[in-house]
Image: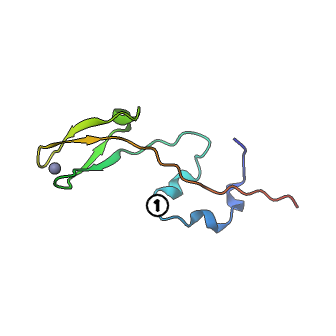
Amino acid sequence: MTELPQEAAPEISEKTDLPHAKARRKGEAKPVPQPPVVANCPYCNARHEIPVEKGKNGKPFFLPCSRCKAEFAVRFVQVTLFQAQVAGFR
Ligand SMILES: [Zn+2]
């Protein structure tokens, strides 16, 4: 991956609605440690944080809800965010 001076990048790249987008900026070349994936129970909306390893392969799996004890299916989907990289040629 090409090295671009991060400081020279305009403010535009900051304007994103996702709170963790900022943290992604600096480590772009290397894989960023992925925080646990959040899954809300479809029945009672209880929040569960699942380690990425559990669903990394994209296969669905079942998760017992910690609150209502019902099992629900979870599948991890990867989301790609576009970021602008700029370079000047003056
Ligand atoms: Zn539940």
Whole-percent x, y for residue 24 in the image = 53, 51
Q: Is residue 52 above or below residue 4?
A: above
Q: Which residue is mark 1?
A: 18
Left or right: residue 46 compared with residue 9: left
The residue tagged with tag 1: helix, strand or loop?
loop
Q: How is the image coloured?
A: rainbow
Quadrant of image for the C terminus: bottom right
Which quarter of the picture shows residue 59? Answer: top left
Total numbered badges shown on the rendered structure: 1
For the N terminus, the image quarter is top right
The residue shown at (65%, 57%) is: 84
Residue 2 to residue 87: above or below: above
Q: Residues within 10 Å of mark 1 (few under 14, many from 20)?
A: few
Residue found at x 41% / y 32%: 57
Looking at the image, residue 28 sits to the left or right of residue 50; the answer is: right
**For residue 12, side relative to residue 44 (left or right):** right
Task: Give x and y (percent) for residue 12.
Answer: 63, 67
Q: Amino acid at mark 1?
A: Leu
Residue that protrudes farthest toward the left in the picture: 68
Residue 81, position as x, y percentages in the image: 54, 53
Residue at image position (51%, 57%) is 21
Judge from the rendering whether residue 20 lies leftward or rightward of residue 28; answer left or right: left
Residue at coordinates 56% horizontally, 67% vertically from top-left?
15
Q: Is mark 1 within 8 Å of ligand 1?
A: no
